[in-house]
Amino acid sequence: MTLWTINAAGRKEFCGGQHARELAAQAADACTGFVPDDEDELVSDDLRTCYNCRYRRWTVASFECMLAAII
């Protein structure tokens, strides 16, 4: 399964949606830029997951990875 797509805004969006815990953890494990978000913004008990990354921005269906915009 492809983990990422480029959405209509031209940003990298996670294909697993908001409830694919294992896939989001795999993506974070493979990411060299993962940084945990502030404690009050964490949404998963698993620390290293894209759902808890400082560089994710929620969308209606999933989230965008903003790391590419920073580099």
Image (cartoon, rainbow, N blue to C red):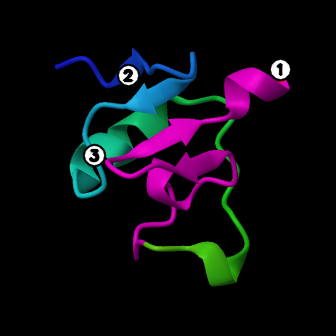
In this rendered view, identify the residue nearer to me: 61 or 35: 61
> Given contact means CB atoms under 8 Å apart, are the residues at marks 1 and 2 in contact?
no
Specify whether residue 42 is painted magenta: no
Residue under numbered circle 2 = 4
Q: From the viewer's perspective, is 37 left or right of 43?
A: right
Q: What separation in Å lies between label 1 and label 3 (alpha carbons)?
A: 24 Å
Q: Secondary structure at mark 2?
A: strand
Q: Secondary structure at mark 1?
A: loop
Specify whether residue 63 is painted magenta: yes
Q: Residue at x 16, y 20 (%)?
A: 1
Q: What separation in Å lies between label 1 and label 2 (alpha carbons)?
A: 17 Å
- For residue 17, the mark is 3
Other-residue count near label 3 (Cα within 10 Å), few / some / many at <14 / 14–19 / ≥20: some
Q: Amino acid at mark 2?
A: Trp
- Residue 39 figure quarter: bottom right
In this rendered view, identify the residue nearer to me: 9 or 46: 9
Residue 71 percent location from the top left of the image: 83, 20
Residue under numbered circle 1 = 71
Q: Find the residue positioned furthest to the front.
A: 8
Residue 49 visible in the snapshot: no
Q: From the viewer's perspective, is 38 left or right of 21?
A: right
Residue 45 visible in the snapshot: yes
User: In the rendered structure, which disc, 1 or 3, sits on the residue that comes first in sequence?
Assistant: 3
Q: Find the residue positioned furthest to the bottom.
A: 40
User: In the rendered structure, which disc, 1 or 2, sits on the residue that comes first in sequence?
Assistant: 2
